[in-house]
Image (cartoon, grey):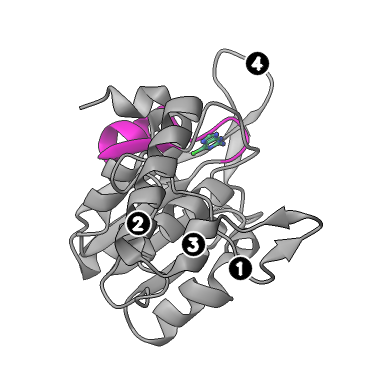
Amino acid sequence: MRIDILTVLPSLLESPFADSILKRAIEKGHVEVHVHNIRDYSESKHKQVDDYQYGGGAGMVLMAEPIAKCIDKLQTERKYDEIIYMTPDGKTLDQRDVNGFSLLKNLLIICGHYKGIDQRIRDEYVTREISIGDYVLSGGELAAAVLCDAIIRLIPGVLSDETSALTDSFQDDLLAPPVYTRPEEWRGRRVPDILLGGNHRDIENWRMDEALRRTRERRPDLLDEN
Ligand code: 6GU
């Protein structure tokens, strides 16, 4: 998979890819992530990328032309399966969306900033508009990093057996059960006996019961979906 990310703040997209699972996924060649600075595509001598919005109102808007120039150049090199715009007014991302994205070959992600991007870029290029939840971030970069993390960890070979995505919360529409590690007793709190017993069928049954109980308590909406 190849992911191209367009931003006016490329440094915000460094550290998420510089450690742990995403770093290894890149090193092992499972994914290429290319971050493009929209400012490099500005025509003006002061490298301007934003301007006041027509009709008035607080906040700057990213201009269409630098973004278009960047996309046009990338589209001469490959065809994109989706052009995603990160925006709080987009469709709220869920695991189903992520599973679908993880099967694609070339993704282009546009990060807005300030008041967002000129609507005409959305009309001209964007195929999906994605939000990561009902709260407002100062820009699309952290949301893009969240989206990339969720996608990349699903690419075959990225996770090992120990970190397998198959037992994730949400992958089967259930929250994950509680987990414990050493010691057996900590501050008077004991690990449930069943986990110490070594009967794998009992343990799996316990985990399923706990997953169901948690889901019923915390996210009953997950149980009556689909
Ligand atoms: Cl994708 N962008 C911004 N700026 N805020 C958000 C978001 C995206 N998703 C939730 N809040």
| Residue on which the image places disc 1 | 181
Lower position in the chain sequence, tag 1 or tag 4: 4
Which quadrant is home to the N terminus? Answer: bottom left
| Residue on which the image places disc 3 | 195
| SS for callout 3 | helix
Whether pointer 2 and pointer 4 mark residues with C-beta atoms closer than 8 Å, the reply is no
Please say if 96 is above or below 41: above
- Within 8 Å: ligand 1 and the Cβ of disc 3? no
| SS for callout 2 | helix
User: Residue 147 or 108: which is nearer the viewer?
Assistant: 147
Amino acid type, label 3: Leu
| SS for callout 4 | loop
Label 3 – label 4 distance at C-alpha: 59 Å
Lower position in the chain sequence, tag 1 or tag 3: 1
* Residue farthest bottom in this picture: 28
Lower position in the chain sequence, tag 2 or tag 1: 1
User: In the picture provided, is 79 more to the left or to the right than 44?
Assistant: left
Residue 148: % across, % down: 42, 58
Amino acid type, label 2: Asp
Whether pointer 2 and pointer 1 mark residues with C-beta atoms closer than 8 Å, the reply is no
- Res. 202 mark: 2
Write the residue at 28% across / 45% down: 172
* Residue farthest right in this picture: 187
